[in-house]
Image (cartoon, rainbow, N blue to C red):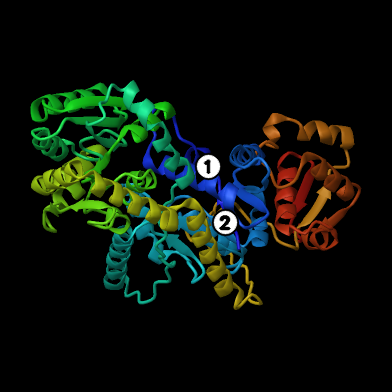
């Protein structure tokens, strides 16, 4: 089983200036899916033809021999043939309602979580209990920690709806845990360049190189203070080099890192590399002995870099935090460092200030990060064990590399996605004979229904339609081509079809009901719309039976 990939360029590309974790995850997924999908053809779901061509180009970039096709939003019913829509983010309400209009069994819908701390995402999740989800839909959680967040939000909203409205039934998507992936073949090749990388960075053979790779942000990623303090202790017994490979959002944050390093780990040699440059990140991976990521921020739910480090054969020192809890085995692949956060209730004022737009999202997550601490003593002890024992580094690095290949290689992850889609298809096809098409979307009603009291009357099958006998085809064509005729916004029938329809009506009169019965076009609502439009611009006249 496969799925149509909801393709939006920024979700599957890595921007040069400010790349985020979700960009790397999306890029990795599309690359892996293009190369490893079981289906012969990779299908995209796109906004329009131009986006479809972009999708095909991206697939060809990753896998030149792979066939690619696409379904456009204007022809959404094409998703029936694929059977599943995968969106690289939280499922949004419009995707569920649009499927609802085609029939609930038309296709499955699957999404995936990344950041769960933003207001936009939390609002989307808390709308789930009111949406027409089906048992064959799923929101993929990248870690057990992120699934816990999603479950808590859904439970709280269901409890509110039960108290406020007396609601008792809340159809929700499945919440399977499937992690993000890594290209193990690509990452394992870094060690080949180790001598050259260390020589280029003037790193000695006995220097202990600790690498942090990722966005450099003390408020939105990982506060570096615990790492700096622990490395300063390590420098009393070893020559320590710290490589921070990433990017700063602005010069103020960059200066904050410089000040903290100078104050807290003056004995540690510091190298800062631009992680947005592929050659710099490759050099950092190759030169390192130990990988460190002491994440303490709620905006992250999985964390790609530790499994990249495992794939590169490096032992890791990471916080016991979010997705790291799933990926790193303490004492096997490296060491997980205890963390402690403030108790529930402490952060409610910050949540309210963010909800009321008093504080920005950056301030909100930064404030939340100040309520989490990392065990500095445990960090220093982990560094010391690894720095003092080359065999331990080798053993843990090898264990991590094996685990990455067995569990987190993109080939494995793509198969997990396909197995999920198979399970959802089986559920959906159990009642395939029931393909009812529903017309209700409460928040997006038919405007001619919602605003039915605006006009004097509403067109009915008994209204009589007459073509203006004073106009010929040339005059009708000229009328249709007037910009004020609004052909550019009337997308239900091309201009040529409208003219042909008008010509078939010329020279006589008929009721709306008769016209709808005789016209071959299947979309009768489009014909009704066309009758009113042609009347609006003076090509037809409408009268009621009484007149």
Q: Nearer the viewer, residue 440 or 143?
A: 143
Q: Is residue 372 visible?
A: no
Q: Which residue is mark 2?
A: 446
- Mark seen at residue 8: 1
**Residue at x 27%, y 33% (from the top left corner):** 216
Instruction: Depth check: give the residue in front, 443 or 386.
Output: 386
Residue 116: give x, y in percent of width and height.
32, 51
Q: Is residue 142 left or right of residue 521?
A: left
Name the residue at 39% across, 66% down.
129
Q: Is residue 513 visible?
A: yes
Q: Callout 2: few (<14), some (14-19), or many (20+) C-alpha neighbours within 10 Å?
A: few
On screen, residue 335 above or below 305: below
How far apart marks 1 and 2 lie (CA) works out to: 28 Å
Q: Secondary structure at mark 1?
A: loop
Q: Secondary structure at mark 2?
A: loop
Answer above or below: position of 66 versus 84. above
Q: Earlier in the sequence, mark 1 or mark 2?
A: 1
Locate the C terminus and report the quarter of the image it occupies.
Answer: bottom right
Q: Is residue 453 left or right of residue 531?
A: left
Q: Quadrant of the N terminus?
A: bottom right
Position of residue 473 measured from the top left corner of the image (x, y, whole percent): 88, 37
Q: Is residue 315 left or right of residue 496?
A: left
Residue at screen point 85% across, 32% down: 475
| Whether residue 312 is situated above or below residue 516 in the rendered picture | above
Report the residue that reaches farthest toward the right.
507
Q: Quadrant of residue 190?
A: top left
Rendered location of residue 327, percent (x, y) = 32, 55
Q: Which mark is residue 383?
A: none
């Amino acid at each position: 089983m496969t799925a149509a990939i909801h393709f939006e360029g920024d979700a599957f590309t890595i921007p040069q200036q400010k790349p985020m974790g979700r960009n790397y995850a999306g890029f990795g997924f599309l690359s892996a899916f293009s190369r490893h999908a079981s289906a012969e053809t990779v299908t995209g779901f796109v906004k329009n033809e131009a986006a479809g061509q972009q999708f095909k180009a991206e697939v060809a970039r990753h896998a030149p021999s792979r066939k690619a096709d696409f379904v456009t939003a204007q022809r959404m019913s094409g998703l029936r043939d694929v059977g599943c829509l995968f969106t690289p983010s939280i499922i949004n309400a419009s995707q569920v309602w649009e499927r609802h209009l085609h029939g609930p069994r038309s296709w499955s819908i699957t999404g995936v979580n990344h950041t769960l701390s933003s207001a936009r995402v939390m609002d989307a999740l808390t709308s789930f209990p009111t949406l027409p989800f089906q048992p064959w839909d799923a929101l993929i959680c990248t870690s057990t920690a992120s699934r816990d967040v999603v479950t808590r939000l859904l439970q709280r909203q269901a409890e509110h709806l039960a108290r406020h409205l007396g609601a008792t039934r809340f159809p929700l998507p499945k919440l399977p845990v499937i992690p993000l992936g890594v290209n193990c073949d690509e990452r394992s090749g870094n060690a080949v360049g180790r001598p050259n990388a260390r020589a280029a960075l003037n790193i000695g053979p006995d220097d202990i190189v600790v690498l942090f790779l990722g966005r450099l942000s003390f408020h939105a990623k990982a506060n570096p203070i615990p790492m700096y303090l622990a490395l300063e202790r390590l420098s009393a017994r070893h020559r320590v080099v710290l490589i921070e490979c990433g990017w700063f959002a602005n010069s103020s944050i960059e200066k904050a890192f410089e000040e903290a390093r100078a104050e807290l780990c003056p004995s540690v040699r510091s190298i800062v590399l631009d992680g947005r440059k592929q050659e710099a990140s490759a050099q950092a991976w190759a030169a390192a002995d130990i990988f460190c990521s002491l994440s303490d921020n709620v905006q992250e739910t999985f964390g790609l870099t530790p499994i990249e480090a495992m794939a590169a054969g490096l032992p890791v020192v990471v916080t016991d935090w979010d997705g790291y809890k799933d990926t790193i085995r303490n004492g096997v692949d490296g060491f997980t460092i205890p963390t402690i956060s403030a108790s529930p209730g402490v952060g409610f004022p910050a949540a309210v200030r963010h909800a009321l737009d008093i504080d920005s999202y950056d301030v909100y997550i930064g404030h939340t990060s100040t309520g989490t601490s990392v065990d500095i003593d445990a960090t220093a002890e982990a560094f010391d064990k690894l720095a003092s024992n080359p065999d331990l580094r080798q053993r843990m690095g090898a264990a991590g590399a094996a685990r990455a290949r067995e569990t987190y290689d993109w080939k494995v992850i793509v198969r997990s996605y396909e197995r999920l889609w198979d399970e959802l298809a089986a559920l959906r096809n159990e009642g395939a004979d029931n393909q009812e098409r529903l017309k209700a979307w409460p928040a997006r009603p038919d405007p001619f229904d919602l605003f039915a009291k605006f006009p004097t009357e509403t067109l009915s099958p008994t209204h009589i339609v007459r073509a203006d006998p004073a106009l010929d085809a040339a005059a009708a064509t000229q009328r249709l081509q007037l910009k004020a005729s609004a052909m550019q916004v009337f997308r239900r029938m091309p201009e040529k079809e409208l003219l042909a329809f008008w010509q078939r009506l010329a020279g006589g009169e008929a009721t709306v009901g008769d016209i709808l019965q005789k016209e071959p076009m299947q979309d009768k609502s489009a014909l009704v719309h066309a009758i009113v439009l042609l009347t609006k611009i003076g090509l037809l006249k409408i009268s009621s039976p009484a007149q």
